[in-house]
C-alpha cells in the first residue's frame, strides 16, 4: 500500500508516501441499542477527521475522493484498535460495525486479512454502491465473513445514495434505515410498518433505525423488533475509552 500510519496521542495520521499528503483523525464509537431493554448490542466505529492544512473537513465528502488503499488502511487501523478492547467487547457480546465500500467486497484477499486479524466480532456496513451485481470474488468474501461469525449490514437504506434494489442482491444480516426516513415518516405508522415488513423479508435479523433523538421517536419504533441508534441513547465517544465505558447502564 502507498500509505503509512503514524500513531499519535488520541489520534492517528495516515500519510500518502506518493504525494506527502496526510489525514489526521480520531476514532469514535456510537452505541446501537435494543430499545426494549436499553442494552447495547453494537458499536458503530466512525472517524472525526482533521486535515493538516484545511482544518475540519466533511467526513462523507472526504471518503468520496480517497483511494481504496486508504480505506483498507483505515479499516485495519480500526481492527487494531478494537483488538485492544477484545475482552470488554467479547465478554459483553458487543459487535463492532465498520463502514466498508461495496467495491471492497470484491477484494477477497483483503477481507480474509481483516478476518484473520480481528479478535472481535464485527459487521461490515456496506455503502457506496456503484453496481448491484455481486462478483464471484465478493461471494468468496461473504463466505469468509460468515464462516467466522461476522455479519454483513446494508447501510443508509432509504437514503438518496443507496438504490432501493440493493436490498434484494443478497440476504443481509441487518439493514440500517437512514435517519432521513425517521424525519420524514415517523408520524405515518403505515409507512413505517410497510418498510419494516419489506426489510424483514430481505434480512436475517432485525433492522436498525438511525437518527433516534427524542423520546417520541423512541416510543414509535420501540414497539417493533428493531435496534436503534442516535443521540438519545449515546453521543459518540473516543474508541480508546471502550474499556472504561459502561454499556449496561444506559438510561433513556
Image (tube, rainbow, N blue to C red):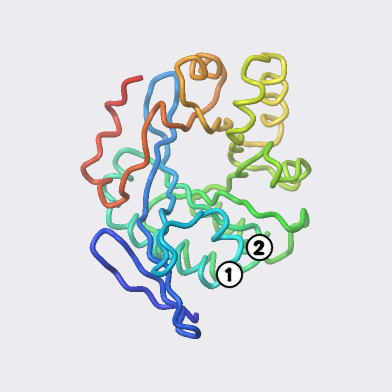
The spot of residue 148 in percent (x, y) is: 49, 54
Image point (41%, 53%), residue name: 48
Residue at the outermost front position: 54
Tell me the crowding category of disc 2: few under 14, some 14 to 19, or many 20 or more residues within 10 angstroms, Cα based: some
Pair 1/2: label in front: 1
In primary-sequence order, the first of circles 1 and 2 is 1
Determine the image quadrant of residue 29: top left
- The percent position of residue 174, horizontal first and vertical second, equals 58, 38
Measured as percent of width and height from the top left, residue 50 is found at 40, 61
**Quadrant of the image for the C terminus?**
top left
User: Which residue is located at x 26 percent, y 67 percent?
Assistant: 8
Mark 1–mark 2 CB contact (< 8 Å): yes
Please indicate whether residue 166 sits to the left or right of residue 24 in the image.
right
User: Of helix, strand and loop, which one carries label 2?
Assistant: helix
Q: Is residue 10 above or below residue 245?
A: below
Compared with 73, 130 (above or below) is: above
Q: Determine whether, in the image, residue 242 is placed left or right of residue 30.
A: left
| Mark 1 closeness class: few <14, some 14–19, many ≥20 residues within 10 Å | some
Image position of 73 with respect to 210: above or below? below
Question: Picture coordinates of residue 40 (x, y %)?
Answer: 38, 32
- Disc 1 designates what residue? 68
| Residue designated by label 2 | 103
Nearest the viewer among 182 and 177 is 182
Q: For the point 48% across and 52% down, which residue is it?
A: 98
Q: In the image as oriented, which residue stretches furthest toward the bottom?
A: 18
- Helix, strand or loop under label 1: helix
Marks 1 and 2, how far apart at CA? 9 Å
Which numbered dot is residue 111? Answer: none
2 and 172: which is toward the camera: 2
Amino acid at each position: 500500500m502507498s500509505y503509512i500510519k503514524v500513531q499519535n496521542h488520541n489520534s492517528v495520521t495516515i500519510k500518502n508516501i506518493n504525494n506527502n499528503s496526510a489525514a489526521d483523525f480520531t476514532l469514535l464509537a456510537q452505541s446501537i441499542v435494543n430499545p426494549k431493554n436499553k442494552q447495547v448490542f453494537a458499536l458503530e466505529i466512525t472517524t472525526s477527521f482533521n486535515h493538516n492544512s484545511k482544518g475540519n473537513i466533511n467526513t462523507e465528502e472526504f471518503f468520496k475522493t480517497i483511494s481504496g488503499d486508504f480505506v483498507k488502511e483505515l479499516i485495519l487501523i480500526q481492527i487494531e484498535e478494537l483488538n485492544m478492547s477484545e475482552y470488554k467487547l467479547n465478554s459483553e457480546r458487543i459487535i463492532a460495525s465498520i463502514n466498508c465500500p461495496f467495491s471492497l467486497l470484491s477484494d477477497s484477499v483483503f477481507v480474509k486479512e481483516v478476518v484473520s486479524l480481528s479478535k472481535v466480532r464485527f459487521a461490515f456496513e456496506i455503502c457506496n454502491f456503484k453496481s448491484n451485481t455481486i462478483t464471484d470474488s465478493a461471494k468468496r468474501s461473504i463466505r469468509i465473513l460468515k464462516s467466522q461469525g461476522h455479519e454483513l449490514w446494508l447501510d443508509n437504506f432509504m437514503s438518496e445514495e443507496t438504490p432501493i434494489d440493493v436490498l434484494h442482491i443478497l440476504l443481509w444480516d441487518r439493514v440500517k434505515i437512514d435517519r432521513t426516513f425517521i424525519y420524514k415518516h415517523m408520524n405515518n405508522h403505515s409507512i413505517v410498518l410497510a418498510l419494516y415488513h419489506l426489510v424483514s423479508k430481505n434480512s436475517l435479523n432485525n433492522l436498525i433505525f438511525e437518527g433516534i433523538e427524542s423520546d417520541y421517536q423512541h416510543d414509535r419504533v420501540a414497539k417493533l423488533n428493531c435496534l436503534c441508534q442516535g443521540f438519545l441513547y449515546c453521543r459518540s465517544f473516543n474508541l480508546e475509552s471502550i474499556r472504561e465505558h459502561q454499556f449496561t447502564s444506559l438510561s433513556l
